[in-house]
Amino acid sequence: MNPAISGAIRGRFVARTVRVRAPGKVNVSLNVGPLRPDGYHSVASVYLAVSLYEEVAATSTEGPGITVSIAPSSTLDLDGVDIPLDERNLAYKAAAIMRDVSENATGVHLEITKRVPVAGGMGGGSADAAATLLACDALWNSGLSREELAHLAAELGADVPFSLLGGTAVGLGVGDELSPALAKAQMDWVLVCADYGLSTPEVFHTLDRLRNTEGLDIPEPLEVDAKILQALRDGNPVALSKVLVNDLQRASIELSPQLRDTIGMGESSGALAGIVSGSGPTVALLAHNPRAAEGLAEDLRHLGHNALAVHGPVPGARIISDTLL
Ligand code: ATP
C-alpha cells in the first residue's frame, strides 16, 4: 500500500508512523559577538554533525492534538532530567508549526528516542525539532521543499536548521545562516558526557559578564577562521586540533570548573585537542583516527567517564521508516 495515503481507508482510520533520525552537533569553532540590543549574540561557527542521533517516531492519531513521550529505549540516563512533554518541548513546537502550514494535518503522537545529552551543548532538542519537522512533513504530505523546512526550522531555534542540513557548515547570524562546507574525510571524536546540564542562556550571560569586567571591545564575528575550513577540506585532524576555538568555553568553565580537568585529562590520555561543545558541558576530544578514538573512549570509561567515540560529518535529518499500522 502506498504510505502516502494515510488516514481514513474505507472509513476506517489507519495510523501511520514516520520515523526520522537527526544528528547532534559539535561546534568545531564558535566565535561569539557582543550582546546585541535584541538580546541575541551574533556568532560565526563551523558546525559538524556527528554520529550520535536523536530519533522521532511521529504517529498519526484519530483524535486531534499533539502528544509527546520519551522512548524507553533512550540510551541516556534520564532520571532527574527535566524534559517538558507539553508545548514547551521543541518537538511539540515543531509539530505545531508544521500543523499550521499543512492542509492534511491529523493529530500526532511523537515518541522521542534520546541519545544526545540533554542540555549538553550538542543541540539535542534542536535535533528533535528537525526530525519532527521532516516526519510531520511526510506524515501530512505537506510537500514543503527543504528550503521551506529550513525556514520553519530557523523559527524554532538557531541550531535547528543545521540538524536538518547536517554535514559540515558555516553558521553566521545567530547560527541559522548556513553555508555548507567541504570536508574531505571524517574526523574522529570522543564525547565526554556530563551527568548534569548547563543552561545555554546562562552560559551566554556568564560570557557577557566576564567580558564586561574586562572592558574589552568585542567585534562582531563576520567570518570563520580559514584555517579551520582548510583543515576540514584536507581531512587533517592534526591541523584541525591546532585551530579549534570556542568563545563560550571560558564561560562554561566558569560555571563548571571541572571541565578544564576533563579537557586536560583527555589531552594527556592521547587526544589531539579537546574543546567544550557549544555551551557545554559535553567535551569533544579530537582523535587521530577511528582506532585512536575507540581506544581513548575505552580508557576514559575505565577512569569512570561517560565517553563515546563518534565521527562526523554525517548527513542531516533522514526518514528511516514509514509504515502503516
Ligand atoms: P543547544 O546546544 O542547542 O543550546 P542543548 O543541547 O545544550 O542545546 P537541549 O538538550 O536541546 O540543550 O535542551 C535544553 C533544554 O530545553 C532542556 O533542559 C529542556 O528543558 C528543554 N527541552 C525542550 N525540548 C526538549 C527536547 N526535545 N529534548 C531535550 N530538552 C528539551
Image (spheres, rainbow, N blue to C red):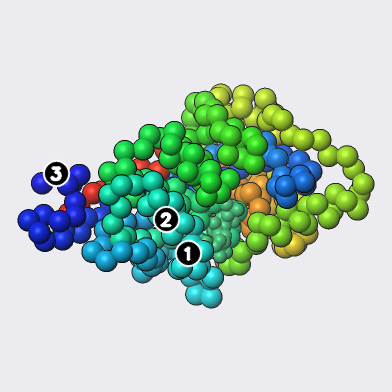
Q: Which image quadrant is residue 92 in?
A: bottom left
Q: CA distance from mark 2 to mark 1?
A: 9 Å
Which-is-in-front pick, marks 1 and 3? 1
Cβ–Cβ below 8 Å for labels 2 and 1? yes
* Label 2 vs 3, first from the N-terminus: 3
Q: Position of residue 11 (x, y in %)?
A: 10, 59
Q: How many marks?
A: 3
- Which amino acid type is marked by label 1? Glu
Drawn side of residue 271 relative to residue 12, left or right: right
Residue occupied by mark 3: 2
In what element is the residue under mark 3?
loop
Residue at 56% from the left image edge and 49% from the top image edge = 157
Q: Which residue is mark 2?
A: 96
Disc 2 element = helix
Residue 52 visible:
no
Name which of mark 1 and mark 3 comes first in the sequence: 3
Residue matched to label 1:
87
Residue 44 seen by the camera: yes
Q: Position of residue 131 (x, y in %)?
A: 40, 49
At label 3, the amino acid type is: Asn
**Closest to the observer, 155 or 33:** 155
